[in-house]
């Protein structure tokens, strides 16, 4: 939550400078080497099966699709509109996890998850801005956010077997490797141009890459010790962090529904922590 929320805050600033494609290429490329080092040092090579390879490819490709459309949405529109829509991936992930992995939740946990979803929406959305944006779905990143939501919703659910078999760090490397290969293939096929960032922008890119990678690693570790249907809604509260940073450092106004959303998130987190 903390890592992804802060990463999105910096990513928006970088995307406004160099575009979504360059930002994404540097984000994934910068992280692949360090992840490989950690995977070699602290993980074992998992047994290679057709099932593992298939799931890894599907999750890796869907993951990069989610990134592409999220960053494209940031380029078109406002973080406060695109981010909460994209973060709704946790709804799809939670439902798939319950269906695929037969995860059984208590009534309080179910209520807590619902309260968190409501809280994320309220906290990360200015309802007045969202109402205006819906009139121009194609041009303000909303459709990109929806596509990102669907792609990530499936990807973050099906990576459970990969993480269980390969471990959280090796799984991160495998998924990131597939995603990076898919990204470069897309860039080459589409003829997208990669611009050269300034030193300051490059520094922000490194921050984005480090935070994004750490968030993904933390998510993988989380689903090895807890239900996917519990970890996902907690991780998906990251738009609230992005909005809070915008309020603190960019002096963006926080409306009443966002304040209510913060309270809802805290209440939801308390409920799902009750065993």
Image (cartoon, grey):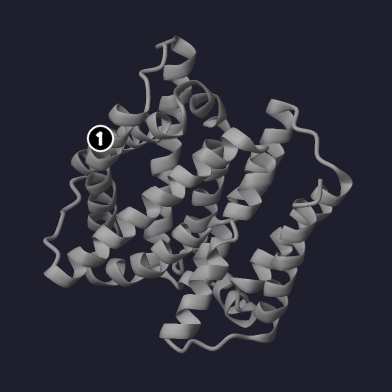
Could you tell me residue 261's position as x and y percent?
69, 73
| Quadrant of the rendering where the C terminus is positioned | top right
Q: Is residue 137 visible?
A: no
| Residue in view at x 71 percent, y 39 percent | 95
Asked whether, in this view, residue 152 is left or right of residue 196, the answer is right
| Residue in view at x 42 percent, y 30 percent | 171
| Residue in view at x 55 percent, y 74 percent | 133
> What residue sits right under mark 1 in the picture?
37
Could you tell me residue 215's position as x and y percent?
45, 51
Nearest the eye: 67 or 202? 202
Q: Report the number of discs.
A: 1
Q: Is residue 8 above or below residue 252?
A: above
Q: Is residue 11 visible?
A: yes
Q: 10 Å neighbourhood of mark 1: few (<14), some, or many (≥20)?
A: some
| Residue in view at x 80 percent, y 49 percent | 109
Nearest the eye: 180 or 7? 7
For the residue labelled by badge 1, is the local secondary structure a helix, a strand or a loop? Answer: helix
Asked whether, in this view, residue 42 is left or right of residue 242, the answer is left
Asked whether, in this view, residue 33 is left or right of residue 77, the answer is left
- Res 161 → quadrant: top right
């Amino acid at each position: 939550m903390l890592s992804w929320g802060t990463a999105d805050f910096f990513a928006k600033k970088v995307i406004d400078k160099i575009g979504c494609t360059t930002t994404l290429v540097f984000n994934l490329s910068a992280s692949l080497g360090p992840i490989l080092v950690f995977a070699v040092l602290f993980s074992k090579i998992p047994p290679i099966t057709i099932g593992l390879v298939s799931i890894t490819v599907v999750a890796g490709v869907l993951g990069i699709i989610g990134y592409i459309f999220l960053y494209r949405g940031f380029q078109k529109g406002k973080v406060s509109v695109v981010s909460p829509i994209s973060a709704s991936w946790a709804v799809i992930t939670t439902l798939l996890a319950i269906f695929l992995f037969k995860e059984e939740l208590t009534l309080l946990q179910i209520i807590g998850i619902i309260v968190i979803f409501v809280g994320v929406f309220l906290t990360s959305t200015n309802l007045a801005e969202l109402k205006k944006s819906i009139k121009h779905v194609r041009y303000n990143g909303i459709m990109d956010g929806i596509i990102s939501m669907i792609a990530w919703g499936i990807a973050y659910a099906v990576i459970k077997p990969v993480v269980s078999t390969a471990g959280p760090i090796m799984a991160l490397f495998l998924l990131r490797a597939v995603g990076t290969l898919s990204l470069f293939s897309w860039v080459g096929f589409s003829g997208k141009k990669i611009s050269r960032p300034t030193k300051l922008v490059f520094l922000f890119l490194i921050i984005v890459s480090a935070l994004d990678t750490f968030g993904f690693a933390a998510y993988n570790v989380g689903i090895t010790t807890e239900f996917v249907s519990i970890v996902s809604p907690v991780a998906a509260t990251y738009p609230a962090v992005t909005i809070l940073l915008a309020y603190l450092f960019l002096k963006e106004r926080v409306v009443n529904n966002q304040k209510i959303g913060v309270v809802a998130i805290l209440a939801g987190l308390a409920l799902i922590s009750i065993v």
